Image: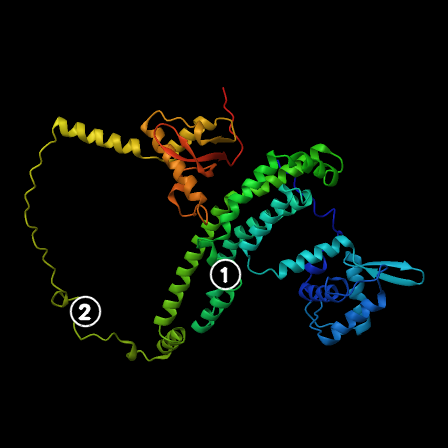
Amino acid sequence: MTQVPALFPLLPSGLFGPLASPNREHYWLLLCRLFDEFFGPDAPVPPSMGFQRREITAALERYLLADDPWEDEDGETPDTPLPVRVNTLYERFRSTGWLRQERIGAREMVTMPPVVHQFLSLLVEFAEHGPTFVSAKMRSIEHQLQQVADGKASGDALDEAADQARRLLVSLSSMSLQVRDLMPELSKAESTAQFARQWFERYVSEFFIGDYAELHTGDHPLARRSAILSVAQQIESGERRSALRAWYREHVGGGDETRGDQRFARSLRRLRELERIDEYLGRLDDDIRQANRRALAFLDYRLRAPDKLDILLRRACRGVQHAPEDALRLPVAPGMLMEASRLRAPRQKPQPIPRSANATQPPTPEQLARLSLLRRMKRARLVNADDMARYVGTHLDTHDQVASEAFSIASIEDLRAYQTLLTLALRSHRIGGLRREDPLGRLLRGYRVELLDAGGRDDNGYLRAPRFVVRRVGPPSRKTA
């Protein structure tokens, strides 16, 4: 079971107090301004001992003079003097842990603790988060892994690549929720023009993947996924494994071999999770198609419905409430409303034309035998996921990979399965790799087929074809007695 990382022992106990108060938006604004002017990456390099307290309080006073929307906890605008309010705000930040004050000689110096500085940087980055660019992240992960495999980088590049892979999957998994949460908010638009403007400005520009259109082309960035998984497999079982384990044991595990191996295995596991990226993109495609249908239906309704229909309905209701009794009579002629002469005559259903059934002749035993033989021939040439799992599993057994020359052919079913593996190897070798919508990709779950050498040939007595290898993606299965 994965250990849950600790959060609150790392942060001061009252850190979330200002951000949970009624004035949380104003506290957040002050923190962002202090971060930009004194402690952030865009600010000048701070002194080693920190800033003097009067510099921080002068900045807070300057912020309040320029923009003071502050409200007291009970909802009333405070009327205390500005210096008193500034000192109160400063003490609130100091007591909750956002700022740290130290006395150096006769001066009171103010700094931001490193852990709080990192936490505030993450919050600012989260607030400024834009659309995800899958292509850039995939190329960055591939480049870092290649550097590690070539010996030009150490375990820190491997750990960073694993973290990028995890952040990419988390971003794609939350994208569907953002699309679903956006539609009810857009439906509250008062006019059709406002809905269309918000749809294109917010839905397309802010919540889509930045390179979403490129994911469905032949040169899509996910074509490099197989290369990333191959390099990760090479790192896990190659010559660099012992050096990387030593780096993790020294720098991450603090000399503890068990802890270092667990962190090394976690990094490789996060990289292998890129195999599931098709599931996230498939669910995102379904959510986007559903959102598009809802948006088109909403626009169609707004364009077809009469203008200001709600106003007309309210006006009609007020007219009915204030109209005299004689004006509310039904617009019908005098007499019995439900008299038999006023009712429509029943419709006479015509009698159906009698039809004679075609004469049927039972098939002869020879015809039945030929039909059964034809069905068996078609079934022998049909390859499904169970047939592929049975054929590949027989040869892989507990191994992680098996070459094409090791596959045996004892029946028509084996020959058809071998042909399917060869087709998958050829399609995965072309530009763009195996496409997500390829139906053959669903026949082989948990395995990956790669073309070894386009010039080499295998001759098994039935086919003379290029050589390929079948690799297991997940952990090897163990047979039980």
Foreground pick, 455 / 191: 455
Q: In which quarter of the view is residue 382 placed?
A: top left
| Mark linked to residue 173 | none
Q: What is the quadrant of the N terminus in the image?
A: top right
Q: Secondary structure at mark 2?
A: loop
User: Where is mark 1, residue-wise?
Assistant: 182
Badge 1: few (under 14), some or many (20 or more) residues near its Cα, within 10 Å? some
User: Where is mark 2, residue-wise?
Assistant: 337
Q: In which quarter of the view is residue 238 placed?
A: top right
Q: Amino acid at mark 2?
A: Leu
Q: CA distance from mark 1 to mark 2?
A: 52 Å
As drawn, which residue projects farthest toward the front? 455
Q: Secondary structure at mark 1?
A: helix
Q: Position of residue 375 (x, y in %)?
A: 24, 32
Q: Position of residue 35 (x, y in %)?
A: 73, 63
Q: Specify whether 51 is left or right of 350.
A: right
Q: Position of residue 208 (x, y in %)?
A: 50, 59
Residue sitting at 49 percent across and 63 percent down? 203
Residue sitting at 55 percent across and 44 percent down? 228
Q: Amino acid at mark 1?
A: Leu
Q: Is residue 410 above or below residue 294?
A: above
Q: Position of residue 120 (x, y in %)?
A: 71, 58
